[in-house]
Image (cartoon, rainbow, N blue to C red):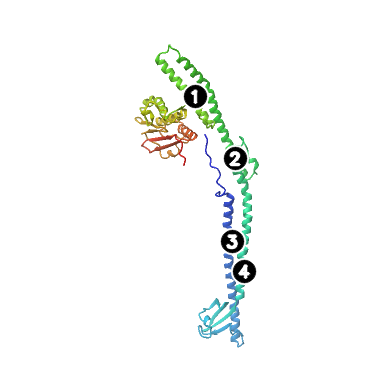
Amino acid sequence: MPVEQAGPAPRATQRTLARELVLAYLIVAVLVGALLSLVSMWTVNRLETHLQQIDMGMALDRVRGEYLAGKDVGRGSRFFHGEPGSETFPAWLRQVEPGFTRIQHDDRDWHIMADDRDGVRYMLLRDYTAFEQRRVRSHWLTVVCVGASLFVAFLLGGAVTRRLVRPLAGLAEQVIKRPALPPQTQIAQAYPGNEIGRLAAAFDATYNQLEMALQRERLFTADVSHELRTPLTVISSSCELLLDDPELTPIQQQKLQRVHTASLDIHQQLAAYLMLARDSSDASGFSRSTIADAVEKERAHWSSRAERLGLRLFAQYDTQRDKTADSSADPAFPAALVRIALSNLIRNALQHASSGTQIVIRARASSFDVTDDGPGVAADIAPHIFAPFITGGAARIDNLGLGLSLVQRICDHQGWRVTLDSQPGRGARFHIDLAPPATL
């Protein structure tokens, strides 16, 4: 059956692996570079401050010793001493605490070392304006160098990332185009024996196994259809000849007619299975009927089995069939496909129903329902009910879990829509809408 596959996203919105890796690399590089720059500048500043504090402390001790020894220290505007906070200190220095301090005054950067000895504060000043300017320039130079390094690293990282991702992108393109290549194609031969090569080899093995399994399924279906066509043709032609025998009693003619009708139905069903196996979209070779006619035939076919199981099977017609004898106003659909889908839904209801359950088939012009008041579908099974080999806990031994999967395949093939409405303990309703979806 044809499966719609989403194509690759447009280039404008596609998020490639290379782009993601480059972006991640850039973010990591920026964060690490910024962290290293901040740590480096903080460490250098702390080291400079510590060294300046030691140097100015030693200088202050030397100048104070010279002053106490009666020598002329010659630093009238750089060396002060006196009672803390007294007028011997300039106004902008009176609030300076003992220790090392940086102050900006009159557009100059001053480093100040103050120390109290025996109630006297000694203070030494140094003009570090030129030093601070050089340090700011040095910091900016560091930032520029780090930024340039990050930019170069980004370019190199992008080039290396694209080089590493290019084989993976090529593999993705080949995987997309793989269905159009000949069977058993080995795309891993174009890749080295690294992780990408092993990934390609694993894809080859898995895809080729699936390809062989699908081919076996198609050949099996084709062989069965081909081998059964001959005996079915013999049965059908023999029934046609026997029906022309005037010596047959009405009961014999009725039974023979049922055999003839059954052989024709099987012939149509084989054609439907072969169409699905070959992935053919041409259903023009099937006889067509209204939903009401298909529902009536399936109701008559399954009624006897329902009675044997103690179940009640009804049909309701919300179509032209109720109004006039002529139902030509209703649309016609491939009879074999409608009856296969309807038959599997009825069989599913019979397999899971308990005694006394009522099964109702409601036919409309372009849709039909199969509803029962049985145990319903378990909540954990409902999302997967149309998958192959899914069976309910109360299913009989003859239930292989393929009927609803076949219904889904037919609906997908024909563009129909099948839905389930069920609550545990309140029955189930399967609805198939055969009308084409409305176009906006």
Which residue bears the numbered disc 3? Answer: 33
Which mark is nearer the camera, 1 or 3? 1
Q: Of the residues under marks 2 and 3, which one precedes in the sequence? A: 3
Which mark is nearer the camera, 2 or 3? 2
Q: From this viewpoint, is residue 313 visible?
A: no
203 up-or-down from 276: above or below: below
Query: Image check: 223 left or right of 256?
Result: right
- Residue sticking out furthest to the bottom: 70
Label drawn at residue 138: 4
- Residue sticking out furthest to the left: 356
Which residue bears the numbered disc 1? Answer: 267
| Structural distance between the alpha carbons of marks 1 and 2 | 37 Å
Which residue bears the numbered disc 2? Answer: 177
Q: Amino acid at mark 3?
A: Gly
**x then y, percent, for residue 331:** 44, 31
Q: Of the residues under marks 3 and 4, which one precedes in the sequence? A: 3
Q: From this viewpoint, is residue 62 visible?
A: yes
Query: Pointer 4: residues within 10 angstroms few (<14), some, or many (20+)?
Result: few
| Structural distance between the alpha carbons of marks 3 and 4 | 17 Å
Q: Amino acid at mark 4?
A: Ser
Which mark is nearer the camera, 4 or 2? 2
